[in-house]
Amino acid sequence: MLEKTTRMNYLFDFYQALLTQKQRNYMEMYYLEDYSLGEISEEAEVSRQAVYDNIKRTESMLETYEEKLHLYEKFQQRLTLINELEAVIANKEEKLFFDKLNQLKELD
């Protein structure tokens, strides 16, 4: 569950501009502010089922955006390469540093 929550938070960060205000509000309350479905439904004055359906539909949309745009995937690749670069710098491996730097540049 924590892995899904983390992934949804990242996807929301990357793609929230593509969502409606209502979708953003529900996702913020559910994933960022840790509201329950019942709390969100009270706040929005809609049924719990309506909130659930909206969140599930929005999650699906975020996954579709990621399948097409790969922003989260590239973010993870960059993070991995940066961590590797830091390790290379710490070990003073100059050739490996430039190899990793070139990989980072080629991601875009």
Image (tube, grey):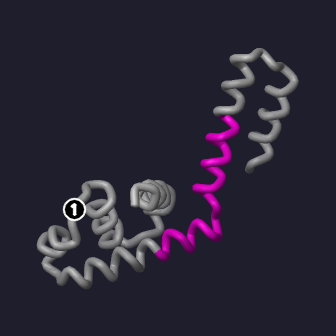
Tell me the crowding category of disc 1: few under 14, some 14 to 19, or many 20 or more residues within 10 angstroms, Cα based: some
**Could you tell me residue 19's position as x and y percent?**
42, 70
**Could you tell me residue 86's position as x and y percent?**
67, 25
Q: Horizontally, is 80 left or right of 105 in the view?
A: left
Residue at the image point whose x is 25% and y is 55% from the top = 33
- Magenta-colored stretch includes residue 51: no
Q: Examine the residues drawn in magenta and state their main secondary structure.
A: helix
Residue at the image point whose x is 61% and y is 49% from the top = 75
Report the span colored magenta.
60-82
Q: Quadrant of residue 81?
A: top right
Local SS, label 1: loop
In the image, what residue type sits under mark 1?
Answer: Tyr
Q: Is residue 81 above or below residue 27?
A: above
Number of disc labels = 1
Placement of the N terminus among the 4 image quadrants: bottom left
Q: Horizontally, is 40 left or right of 24 in the view?
A: left
Residue at the image point whose x is 80% and y is 45% from the top = 106
**Could you tell me residue 40's position as x and y percent?**
19, 70
Q: Is residue 65 above or below residue 92?
A: below
Residue at the image point whose x is 49% and y is 69% from the top = 62
- Magenta-colored stretch includes residue 70: yes
Residue reaching furthest front? 1
Q: Is residue 107 above or below residue 68?
A: above
Residue wearing tag 1: 35
Q: Quadrant of residue 24?
A: bottom left
